[in-house]
Image: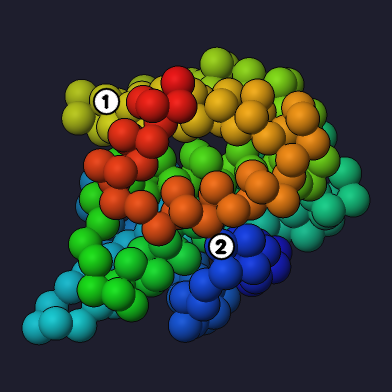
Amino acid sequence: MLSRLQRGLEELYRLDAGACVDDFVIDEASRDRVVGARRPREQLLVCEAEGEMSVALFVDPAALANLAANDPARTLDDGNFGDFLLAVEGVSHFVYTLACARVDRAVSQLELELQAEVDKYVTCLLVGAPSRVLRHRLFADAIYEPDLDADERERYRAANDNAHRYAAWLEATYVEPGKIPDMLGELRRFYRDSLAAKLGRIARAA
Protein backbone atom coordinates (compact mmCIF):
# COMPACT_ATOMS: atom_id res chain seq x y z
CA MET A 1 0.00 0.00 0.00
CA LEU A 2 2.71 2.49 0.94
CA SER A 3 4.71 1.98 -2.25
CA ARG A 4 1.51 2.27 -4.31
CA LEU A 5 0.77 5.59 -2.63
CA GLN A 6 4.33 6.73 -3.29
CA ARG A 7 4.05 5.91 -6.98
CA GLY A 8 0.76 7.79 -7.11
CA LEU A 9 2.20 10.92 -5.49
CA GLU A 10 5.32 10.82 -7.64
CA GLU A 11 3.23 10.48 -10.77
CA LEU A 12 0.90 13.26 -9.65
CA TYR A 13 3.73 15.68 -8.92
CA ARG A 14 6.10 14.42 -11.64
CA LEU A 15 9.02 13.73 -9.37
CA ASP A 16 11.26 10.92 -8.18
CA ALA A 17 12.06 10.71 -4.48
CA GLY A 18 14.99 8.47 -5.31
CA ALA A 19 14.11 5.75 -2.79
CA CYS A 20 11.27 3.31 -2.09
CA VAL A 21 9.31 3.96 1.08
CA ASP A 22 9.01 0.23 1.82
CA ASP A 23 12.76 0.11 2.45
CA PHE A 24 12.48 2.70 5.22
CA VAL A 25 9.50 1.37 7.18
CA ILE A 26 10.29 0.34 10.76
CA ASP A 27 8.27 -1.62 13.29
CA GLU A 28 6.94 -0.30 16.58
CA ALA A 29 9.77 -1.71 18.68
CA SER A 30 12.38 -0.02 16.50
CA ARG A 31 10.52 3.27 16.63
CA ASP A 32 10.11 3.12 20.41
CA ARG A 33 13.84 2.59 20.92
CA VAL A 34 14.64 6.01 19.46
CA VAL A 35 11.52 8.04 20.31
CA GLY A 36 11.02 9.11 23.88
CA ALA A 37 8.22 11.63 23.47
CA ARG A 38 4.92 11.25 21.61
CA ARG A 39 4.40 7.98 19.76
CA PRO A 40 1.58 8.53 17.27
CA ARG A 41 0.28 5.93 14.81
CA GLU A 42 2.29 7.53 12.01
CA GLN A 43 5.71 9.09 12.46
CA LEU A 44 8.54 10.13 10.16
CA LEU A 45 11.91 10.07 11.89
CA VAL A 46 14.68 12.25 10.43
CA CYS A 47 18.24 12.58 11.67
CA GLU A 48 20.92 14.77 10.10
CA ALA A 49 24.61 14.37 10.96
CA GLU A 50 27.77 15.38 9.12
CA GLY A 51 25.83 16.31 6.00
CA GLU A 52 24.01 12.98 5.82
CA MET A 53 20.28 12.47 6.39
CA SER A 54 18.79 9.29 7.80
CA VAL A 55 15.05 8.65 7.47
CA ALA A 56 12.65 6.05 8.85
CA LEU A 57 8.86 5.81 8.70
CA PHE A 58 6.53 4.18 11.17
CA VAL A 59 2.92 3.48 10.22
CA ASP A 60 0.66 1.49 12.54
CA PRO A 61 0.82 -2.13 11.30
CA ALA A 62 -2.86 -2.58 12.16
CA ALA A 63 -3.73 0.24 9.75
CA LEU A 64 -1.67 -1.34 6.97
CA ALA A 65 -3.27 -4.73 7.60
CA ASN A 66 -6.72 -3.16 7.36
CA LEU A 67 -5.84 -1.47 4.08
CA ALA A 68 -4.48 -4.73 2.69
CA ALA A 69 -7.78 -6.43 3.54
CA ASN A 70 -9.96 -3.47 2.47
CA ASP A 71 -8.30 -1.85 -0.53
CA PRO A 72 -9.28 1.85 -0.83
CA ALA A 73 -8.88 1.56 -4.61
CA ARG A 74 -12.00 -0.62 -4.57
CA THR A 75 -13.98 1.11 -1.82
CA LEU A 76 -13.14 4.02 0.45
CA ASP A 77 -15.57 4.03 3.36
CA ASP A 78 -15.80 4.31 7.13
CA GLY A 79 -14.03 0.97 7.49
CA ASN A 80 -10.76 2.13 5.92
CA PHE A 81 -10.94 5.92 5.58
CA GLY A 82 -9.00 6.79 8.74
CA ASP A 83 -6.28 4.25 8.07
CA PHE A 84 -5.99 5.43 4.47
CA LEU A 85 -5.42 8.99 5.66
CA LEU A 86 -2.75 7.72 8.05
CA ALA A 87 -0.93 5.96 5.21
CA VAL A 88 -1.21 8.96 2.88
CA GLU A 89 0.19 11.25 5.56
CA GLY A 90 3.19 9.03 6.18
CA VAL A 91 4.03 8.63 2.51
CA SER A 92 3.48 12.34 1.89
CA HIS A 93 5.96 13.21 4.64
CA PHE A 94 8.47 10.70 3.28
CA VAL A 95 8.26 11.82 -0.36
CA TYR A 96 8.25 15.54 0.42
CA THR A 97 11.23 15.27 2.76
CA LEU A 98 13.29 13.38 0.20
CA ALA A 99 12.20 15.62 -2.67
CA CYS A 100 13.33 18.71 -0.75
CA ALA A 101 16.58 17.03 0.32
CA ARG A 102 17.42 16.22 -3.30
CA VAL A 103 17.45 19.94 -4.13
CA ASP A 104 19.11 20.85 -0.82
CA ARG A 105 16.07 22.73 0.48
CA ALA A 106 15.23 22.85 4.16
CA VAL A 107 11.66 22.02 5.11
CA SER A 108 9.73 22.98 8.23
CA GLN A 109 7.28 20.83 10.15
CA LEU A 110 4.44 23.20 9.21
CA GLU A 111 5.31 22.81 5.54
CA LEU A 112 5.30 19.02 5.87
CA GLU A 113 1.92 19.05 7.59
CA LEU A 114 0.36 21.50 5.12
CA GLN A 115 1.48 19.44 2.13
CA ALA A 116 0.24 16.26 3.78
CA GLU A 117 -3.21 17.78 4.32
CA VAL A 118 -3.37 18.82 0.67
CA ASP A 119 -2.19 15.36 -0.38
CA LYS A 120 -4.93 13.71 1.69
CA TYR A 121 -7.60 15.82 0.02
CA VAL A 122 -6.29 15.28 -3.51
CA THR A 123 -5.64 11.55 -3.08
CA CYS A 124 -9.11 10.87 -1.70
CA LEU A 125 -10.64 13.08 -4.40
CA LEU A 126 -8.89 11.14 -7.15
CA VAL A 127 -10.00 7.86 -5.58
CA GLY A 128 -13.55 9.09 -6.03
CA ALA A 129 -14.62 10.81 -2.81
CA PRO A 130 -17.08 13.72 -3.35
CA SER A 131 -15.22 16.99 -2.80
CA ARG A 132 -17.69 18.80 -0.53
CA VAL A 133 -18.20 15.81 1.74
CA LEU A 134 -14.47 15.15 1.77
CA ARG A 135 -13.56 18.73 2.68
CA HIS A 136 -15.97 18.73 5.59
CA ARG A 137 -14.73 15.39 6.87
CA LEU A 138 -11.05 16.24 6.54
CA PHE A 139 -11.03 19.80 7.74
CA ALA A 140 -14.25 20.95 9.41
CA ASP A 141 -14.43 17.80 11.56
CA ALA A 142 -10.71 17.77 12.42
CA ILE A 143 -9.94 16.42 15.90
CA TYR A 144 -6.52 16.96 17.47
CA GLU A 145 -4.78 14.51 19.76
CA PRO A 146 -5.13 15.50 23.42
CA ASP A 147 -1.42 15.05 24.17
CA LEU A 148 -0.24 17.71 21.70
CA ASP A 149 1.61 20.63 23.27
CA ALA A 150 0.61 24.21 22.45
CA ASP A 151 3.11 24.61 19.59
CA GLU A 152 2.14 21.28 18.02
CA ARG A 153 -1.56 22.06 18.28
CA GLU A 154 -1.08 25.44 16.65
CA ARG A 155 0.99 23.90 13.84
CA TYR A 156 -1.63 21.27 13.07
CA ARG A 157 -4.42 23.85 13.25
CA ALA A 158 -2.57 26.19 10.87
CA ALA A 159 -1.96 23.33 8.41
CA ASN A 160 -5.60 22.25 8.61
CA ASP A 161 -7.03 25.76 8.19
CA ASN A 162 -4.80 26.65 5.24
CA ALA A 163 -5.38 23.31 3.52
CA HIS A 164 -9.13 23.77 3.97
CA ARG A 165 -9.05 27.17 2.28
CA TYR A 166 -6.90 25.83 -0.53
CA ALA A 167 -9.13 22.78 -1.04
CA ALA A 168 -12.24 25.00 -1.14
CA TRP A 169 -10.58 27.11 -3.83
CA LEU A 170 -9.54 24.02 -5.81
CA GLU A 171 -13.09 22.74 -5.60
CA ALA A 172 -14.65 25.98 -6.87
CA THR A 173 -12.00 26.65 -9.52
CA TYR A 174 -11.31 23.18 -10.90
CA VAL A 175 -13.40 20.36 -9.45
CA GLU A 176 -16.90 21.76 -9.94
CA PRO A 177 -16.19 23.02 -13.50
CA GLY A 178 -14.60 19.64 -14.36
CA LYS A 179 -11.12 21.05 -15.00
CA ILE A 180 -9.15 18.28 -13.35
CA PRO A 181 -6.16 18.40 -15.77
CA ASP A 182 -5.79 22.12 -15.02
CA MET A 183 -6.00 21.37 -11.29
CA LEU A 184 -3.11 18.91 -11.58
CA GLY A 185 -0.95 21.66 -13.08
CA GLU A 186 -1.85 23.96 -10.20
CA LEU A 187 -1.03 21.25 -7.66
CA ARG A 188 2.39 20.66 -9.22
CA ARG A 189 3.21 24.36 -8.97
CA PHE A 190 2.00 24.47 -5.37
CA TYR A 191 4.11 21.43 -4.45
CA ARG A 192 7.32 23.12 -5.58
CA ASP A 193 6.59 26.43 -3.84
CA SER A 194 8.28 27.44 -0.59
CA LEU A 195 6.13 27.60 2.52
CA ALA A 196 5.87 31.38 2.23
CA ALA A 197 4.78 31.06 -1.41
CA LYS A 198 2.25 28.36 -0.51
CA LEU A 199 0.70 30.53 2.21
CA GLY A 200 0.68 33.53 -0.10
CA ARG A 201 -1.00 31.51 -2.85
CA ILE A 202 -3.66 30.33 -0.39
CA ALA A 203 -4.25 33.85 0.93
CA ARG A 204 -4.74 35.20 -2.58
CA ALA A 205 -6.99 32.30 -3.56
CA ALA A 206 -9.18 32.59 -0.46
The quadrant of the image that shows the C terminus is top left
Instruction: Name the secondary structure under disc 2.
Output: helix
Q: Is residue 181 visible?
A: yes
| Label 2 to label 1: alpha-carbon separation | 28 Å
Identify the residue position indicated by label 1 in the image: 154
Classify residue 144 as left or right of residue 149. Answer: right
Which of the two residues, 141 or 70, is positioned nearer the viewer here? 141
Residue, far right: 74
State the residue in front, 95 or 87: 95
Q: Residues within 10 Å of mark 2 (few under 14, many from 20)?
A: some
- Name the mark on residue 67: none
- Disc 2, disc 1: CB below 8 Å? no
Give the crowd class for mark 1: few <14, some 14-19, many >=20 residues within 10 Å: few
In the rendered image, which residue does mark 2 sit on? 13
Q: Position of residue 185 (x, y in %)?
A: 59, 53
Please, which colouring scheme is shown? rainbow
Percent across and percent down for residue 94 are: 44, 64
Residue 4: percent from left, percent from top = 69, 68
Of the residues shown, which amino acid type is indicated by label 1? Glu
Q: Residue at x 45, y 49 (%)?
A: 190
Identify whether 101 is placed above or below 140. below
In the rendered image, the vertical position of residue 124 relative to residue 18, given as above or below: above
Asked if one can make out residue 80 in the rendered structure from this viewpoint, the answer is: no
N-terminal-most mark, 2 or 1: 2
Q: Residue at x 40, y 58 (%)?
A: 192
Query: In what quadrant of the picture does the N terminus appear?
Result: bottom right
